[in-house]
Amino acid sequence: MALLQLTDIQKSYGRGPKAVPAVRGVDLVIDRGETVGLVGESGCGKTSLGRVVVGLQSATDGEILFDGEAIDRGQLSQPGYRRRVQMVFQHPDQSLNPRLRVKQMLAEPLRLLTDVPSEEITDRIERTLTLVGLGPGYMERRSRQLSGGQQQRVAIARALICEPDLVVLDEPTSSLDQSVRARILALLRDIQQERQVAYLFISHDLSTVRKIADRVAVMYLGRVVELADTETIFESPQHPYTRALLSAVPRMDPHRKRERIMIPGETPNPSALPSGCSFQDRCPLVHDRCTREAVYPLAVAAGHLVECFAVEDRVAGAP
Amino acid sequence: MSLLEVTDLTVGVKGSQASLLRNVSFSVEPGRIAGLVGESGSGKTVASLSIMGLLPNTLELRSGSLQVNGREMIDCETGRVERTSDELAMIFQQPRSALNPTMKVGRQIARVLRINQGMERKESRDEAVGMLSRVGIPGASRVAEAYPHQLSGGMCQRVMIAMALSCKPRILIADEPTTALDVTIQAQIFDLILDLVADTGSGVVFITHDLAAVSEMCDDVVVLYGGQVMETGSKVEVLDNPAHPYTKFLLDAIEREVDPRIEEKDVNFGLTGCRFGHRCPHAFSACANLPPLYEVTPGHAASCFLLDEELTRGAAATD
Amino acid sequence: MSAIPADDFHEHEGGGPFIPPEIDATAQRASFVRRKPLAAIGIVILSVYVLVAVLGPFFVVDPLTTDPSNALLPPSAEHWFGTDKFGRDVFARAVYSARLDLSVGVAIAMAATAIGSVIGVIAGYWGGWVDEVMMRLTDVVLAFPGFVLALVLVAVLGNSIPNVMIAVGAAYIPYFIRLTRAEVLTQRELEYVDGARLAGNSRWRIAFRHVLPNSLRPSLVQATLVAGWSILTVAGLAFLGVGIRPPTPEWGVMVAEGAPDIITGQWWTALFPGGLIVLAVMAFHFIGDEFGGEPL
């Protein structure tokens, strides 16, 4: 059974005609113990969606089903939900309160969200610190006595200490060095195997997502334009945006001739979108239907959804 | 003759023994892109600032030579680098903060043209618009009338490039020009830099933390760690046959799927030894000294005692 | 399972120049006096003041005993700062003043910081109409010069030392409200606030346990300056005959009493206490200025 089921999630900032849409109708399912990668460029709404999932922001519209139960707006900030859905942030240097010691940061969620007896709290903190590769020796440290990678490990420990079912990871490695990044990713994977925790891994970095995700959702201007298992997304992407995104990522192959980027221009302003497909201005496959009709997700294979008329025509034309 | 020849550049902190760059040497040929690659703290930014003569006054140039077009730029008495804006131009990681926020971008470029090329006011205005359209900005005359905050990060970087090019530099120093940008925009900027090199025959020092970007963009690579050149050579040589343990480690961190657990050694080679010594799986007694560059193949060298046959034979014998 | 161990040396965060570990140690060893010479001077001066304020009264003559036969004597070995027109020892009076002026100044600064920060956090973190109302109130208070406001408040509250402290403190509170609020506006956007929310903290707990301690730095710097200004203001009020009144030994009172003597050539009765005020305010300023950018 699905752990988290999002149906038609909408999120806008501001009210009335000036509202700027960030998430425009997203359906997404996350199963127990799996990692879903949420990929897109800045302004695509991936972070907004992640914050809606953990309840840091409330959705303008849409439905959240968690573990089979509908979660309404009030429940999102209740200890019952907080304990089971946690988040790791992008900037490890900012996400830890500089005044607190590591043990205080980790004790807080246990005290406020669970009924773990206070004599067991220290033991639990030590176990969690060991789980993230730091060990009890770090209990007395403060944030600025830690390196970036260590700070992120503490942030991961804080998210995991209540043994949640789902952790939203918002660009957890993008401000770390390459070698540190690899270690944090490996750590996250180990933890998942041991704890059966599900991840929503938000990132702009496709090569990172490829290493950790089971399935990948590609977002563009507030919608999921393609969703498939990781191999399919990277080996046979269908949506022209996914293809452009993949071709834009530098490759580690010194012999390869560089391809030129296929899509011109920049992401348009979300408050003044044209009718029809929102990718039409930059799309190499655009035709007149894209400017008239609203696009919808099309299943091109089992578990592979694409929002593109050109792909639909190709699938229909090749029986 | 090389456009830029850096030899044994050593930069230190004033009033301290420690150095941020140790005997760094590399060169840039016309029409080629040299990649300076390293993680944060590797000294890559210090190197670029030294070349530009922009070292903060807490740092000092200790020794070395810096030749632009065969002319020595370091005043051997004061240890200062002459500012050489007519030969060198630089683009930065945060283009928006490098632009004057209170001045329209067209005027900023026009000013550079007047100062550097001695143009008249009217001529410089027209040329500024010309420069903007040359770097691929659609509607250049409109963008020239915009302030930096009205432009996206990608646009600002194009403006920076236009401004850098308006000095007609022989060498362009690009310090992580795309780290703040999305991948599709990064790809567009990469295309732009490659086109410019092909058109003008300028040399580029491309500073980055991303080996994949090096693989896409550069002709030659200099791998830096802790202010020390670890390995240098042509892109294909270094990436295909890495000779230094650090380069191998970096490549592994990107490519490898398995956990990058490296054994940490309880050694400290202090101020004089190899910077990578304490992390190096192969470190041995000789590493307490600074290793020179050993030639691997012509044009490809690495700074590691493992390449010294006499020493390694000796070490093997004592084991 | 063995977790992937943290890499102690190398997992430093992105950005900034490479600082090899050995430099950190050197920077630590570099003497405080070299790095912050003015603050060091300020601390030395204030330490002397505090020492004199605490111990001085045990060693000097009674500041209130008059001796008309020894009036207006110039500074000598017996009377270091001379005597005033009632024959009281100026040095003894100045020493007793230090006790009063320093404790009044520091107490005002501490109270204003505490009250201002709490109000500032509420305004900054809650925002909306709460913020709007508080900001307009501080605007009203700030529209008056602090000195004039304190003067009016003392006139309303009555002429006593506690009332002077309340009046002067009230005049400085708006500065602390604004400083704290501005810092809270920055702090509340940082990710640790979201992290605290997810850890189950209530709004009140986030505001006072997480945001407030991280928003205090500008106020603490300001507090050292305000301690100096408060001494000046209290002395200024006393000079005008408001608040602390003769014969209480207080620098402002002494300047007021001694000012007419300057014309007749007895400069020491006003100049010594005046100089002590200037030196104390300067010392507080030195400290505040140099700690502006230092992590507390």
Image (cartoon, grey):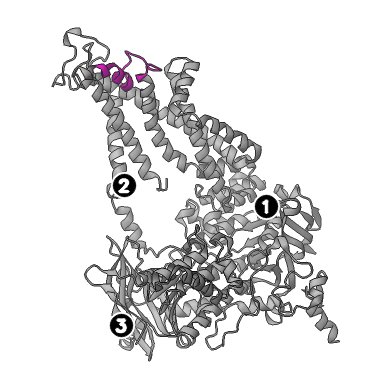
Q: Which residue is mark 3?
A: B70
- Label 2 element class: loop
In which quadrant is the N terminus of chain B drawn? bottom left
* Chain holding disc 3: B
Q: Nearer the viewer, residue B154 or A105?
A: B154
Which label sits in the foreground, 3 or 1?
3
For the residues labelled 1 and 2, the Cα–Cα distance comes to: 43 Å
Which residue is at 33% across, 15% downward?
C248
Outermost residue on the bottom side: it is B298
Q: Nearer the viewer, mark 1 or mark 2?
A: 2
Residue at mark 3 to residue at mark 1: CA–CA distance: 59 Å
Q: Position of residue A210 (x, y in %)?
A: 64, 74
Helix, strand or loop under label 3: loop
Q: Is residue A229 above or below residue C111?
A: below
Say whether residue A112 is magenta.
Answer: no
Q: In percent of the image, x 45 and y 72: which residue is there?
A: B164
Residue beneath disc 2: C36
In which chain is the residue bearing label 1?
A
Q: Residue at x 64, y 70 (%)?
A: A266
The vertical placement of A95 against B300, above or below, is above
Q: Which chain contains the residue that carries disc 2?
A: C
Q: Which mark is residue B201?
A: none
Rendering coords of residue B250 (x, y %):
48, 76
Q: Is residue A206 visible?
A: yes
Q: Amino acid at mark 3?
A: Gly
Q: CA distance from mark 3 to mark 2?
A: 44 Å
The residue segment tinted magenta is C239-260
Residue B32 image position (x, y, % from top left): 44, 84
Q: Nearer the viewer, residue C161 or A147?
A: C161
Q: Residues within 10 Å of mark 3 (few under 14, many from 20)?
A: few
Image x and y of residue A94, in percent: 53, 54
